[in-house]
Amino acid sequence: YMKMSGRYAIPKSISKTAIDSLHAKLSAIDAGWLSSNSPSLLDGYTLILEQIYDGIEGPQSKRRRQTPLVNAGYAARMAVMTFILEKWFDSVLSRDENIEGINVVVLGCGLDAVGLWSRNVLNDTLTKYQQRAEDQSPKLNVYEIDAWDNCVLKQHALERSGIVQVHRTTNNTDDDSTKESSFCALMEGTINKAASKEVDLSDYHLIAMDFRHICKDKNLLKKALDSTGFDPSQPTIILSELVLAYIGYESTNAILQTMATHLLRDNGRSMFLCLEPMLPTGTEQHHYSTNKKQFFSVKESYARDYANQFLGKLNRGNSSTNSDDDDVFHPLGSNRETIVARLISSGFSMSNLDAASLRKAVGEVSSTHRLIAKEPFDEHAALALNMECYAVACAFGGSSDGNLGRLLPWLDHSMQNSSSTIRIAPIEDSSQDKLVGNLYGRIYAHLYNKYPAIRKMVKSALKTDLFADSANGSSAIQNRFEGKGGKFWIALDVESSDIVGCIGVRQRKINECDDQSDTGELSSTFSAVEYEVQRLAVVDKHRGKGIGKRLLNAVYEYSLQQGSVVMNDMEMVEKKKNGLSVQLLAVTPDVLVNANNLYNAFGFMKKESFGGGLTMNVYSKTCYYYKSS
């Protein structure tokens, strides 16, 4: 970097983006968009942003004012991220008085203040609960990671502004060998008292790393954090804002898997929080369209145009005409369902995660008076469409113990409202086999006289895959389904030990499929692995409690995780072509109204019907599409 009139020249587009984001966030704050029930706490966030700005632009420089629509969009992002960070600290410290340390990891930190501001949040939360003496406060470790050029820029800003008391820096920052290494701990220090106005116990680590290299070394993020003494056993929050969409499909998958299996694993106090674009890519447009239509709603058209704007900015100045758009820009997903599916396929549990549009999140957060328009604003429709193009996703590393609902006020509580005494678990032993057989034999008994075909189907099931083999202590039912590449679950009432529901799934086959574009033209060939839902049943008195949906969720999660295994199987290299689609199938009698309604509500589409005396409906659902590397 060349020093020019007190400023640093910005030679890289990625650094220019960081500068633009800093200007936009300060513009939104200056316009009065951000407010809080704890104004002094958000004042600390603003102060750190201003100090970073002064360290880059100089204290006398004039700030750029953005349009009201841009101000509103950036204010929405800041409001949601700061809101959840505060809630997370509150949830951690309200439950545990023996915490020795807390980690805050910011991926793609840019020039944002949220990592540094976490010191203020910790102090504010400790004051609220008056838990400890000042010298017994948990040690806060802040890890900020970004591309080399952004880290150098932020290092200069922090050193010039005095926000961080520097303990160690990496010398020879212009050395190509250092710059081209996989990662580099560029700077370590302590967040200055001026930023938190308290005696500070926190450590600050600035790590330079090219996230795109993670696809080559899937443990790179873990290695980088380990090199600084990172302790994953401590409560950890990992933040990502508009980062994952730009580093490549495989690198994003590697980061998600590292978090799920290493950094956050089995720690119910640790959480991943991201705010990322939720837009269609060429690949997802092909594989998630249930009918290949050429006409789109206003929302869909806006999302497509907005995605093209992202690509246009990224490809500006790019002379290559053969680049794959998905390699340049690949959002976390095109809707809530695909984002949830991707997190599950990476190793997170469905019961410990959620995602929502930024618009839905802001609708709840703004009720705390955090987002208020103090400048003339009449672009509400445009703002709503824009916020539908971003997602807020949250995932815990282990059992969240209800924290998900406390942290995310927009969460759909329908699943939490189902009977809390019912546990969904894999069937384990022969005694449970007998209970399942009894349940399945009597649950459809009222239909036997009118529909002999149903009696025949049930008897066949009890003689084959649901047959209870008393000679074996383990579950014969589970063994049979696992032998077919599947699994079997029960809904167990933990108070009475009664089995009140069951479900199974088995892998059917792997097909090669031809995909069509929206115009009907052949666009690619991909593989599809099919899993069939079987033996779904819930006893009458427990229906309407969400148990059937929870049983389907277990099948859905299993299919996604197994699909990831199939995709990574070396034997699939020749078969997977352009990718792998995971599909669920279900066949159920038309007379079972509740079952048919459940499949429809879960997103299954009826493909066909067959049969004479007893009409059978065939349902299908595409769960996820794994793009081939």
Image: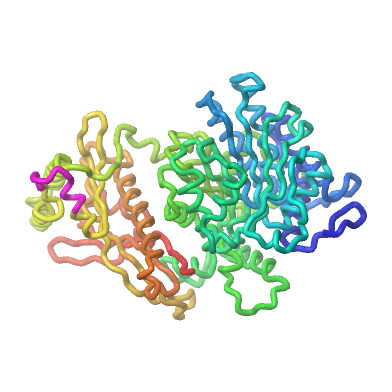
Residue appearing at x 25%, y 29% in the figure: 495
Q: Is residue 505 visible?
A: yes
* Left or right relative to 556: residue 578: right
Residue range in magenta is 469-479
Any part of residue 24 in sight? no
Residue 337 rendering spot, x and y as whole percentages: 45, 54
Residue 107 versus residue 312: which sits nearer the camera? Answer: 107
Question: Against 307, is 26 above or below?
Answer: above
Quarter of the image for the N terminus: give it: bottom right
Does the segment drawn in magenta span residue 293? no
Question: Is 606 displayed left or right of 327 in the figure?
Answer: left
Residue sitting at x 62%, y 25%: 137
Q: Is residue 477 magenta?
A: yes
**Residue 264: percent from left, percent from top:** 49, 43
417 or 157, which lies in front?
A: 157
Percent position of residue 29, x then y: 76, 42
Residue 535 falls left or right of residue 172: left
